[in-house]
């Protein structure tokens, strides 16, 4: 059986990380528990949060298994400032 390719994208500005398996978007995870559940739904059962965090199965982009929030407000402020919007 071929191993699935699991990619966890960098955190979005609105929070959470997009999860893809073999190129198909499974959903948005806000923590390791969400990721475990999404993987369970595609047949990867019996994994817990520790298994997923340490597994070579997962490609972590933009931070490892402990990074789920977007960068702090300074990054958001920079995005808003360049768009011409001056209020939060």
Image (cartoon, grey):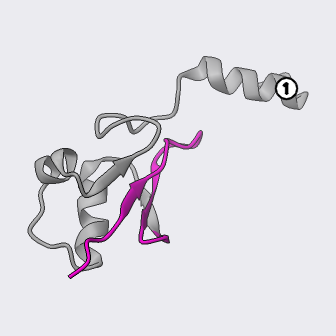
Q: How many labels does the image show?
A: 1
Magenta span of residues: 1-25
Based on the displayed image, in which of its 4 quarters is residue 68 positioned?
Answer: top left
Most distant residue in the right direction: 84
Based on the displayed image, in which of its 4 quarters is residue 61 positioned?
Answer: top left
Query: Is the residue 27 above or below the residue 87 in the image?
Result: below
Query: Is the residue 25 above or below the residue 18 in the image?
Result: below
Quarter of the picture containing the C terminus is top right
Write the residue at 49% across / 70% down.
23
Give residue 60's position: percent from left, percent from top: 37, 45
Write the residue at 59% across / 39% down.
13
> In the depicted view, which residue is nearer to us: 24 or 5?
5
User: Most prominent secondary structure in the magenta stretch?
Assistant: loop
Secondary structure, mark 1, is helix
Q: Mark 1 points at which residue?
A: 82
> In the depicted view, which residue is nearer to us: 63 or 88?
63
Q: Does the magenta stretch include residue 20?
A: yes
> In the depicted view, which residue is nearer to us: 2 or 70?
2
Q: Is 61 on the left or on the right of 35, as rendered?
A: right
């Amino acid at each position: 059986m071929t191993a699935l390719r699991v990619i966890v994208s960098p955190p979005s500005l609105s929070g959470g990380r997009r999860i893809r398996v073999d190129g198909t978007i499974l959903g948005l995870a806000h923590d390791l528990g969400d990721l475990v559940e999404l993987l369970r739904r595609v047949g990867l059962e019996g994994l817990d949060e520790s298994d997923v965090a340490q597994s070579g199965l997962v490609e972590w982009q933009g931070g490892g298994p402990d990074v789920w929030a977007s960068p702090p407000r300074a990054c958001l402020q920079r995005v808003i400032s360049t768009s011409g919007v001056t209020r939060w």
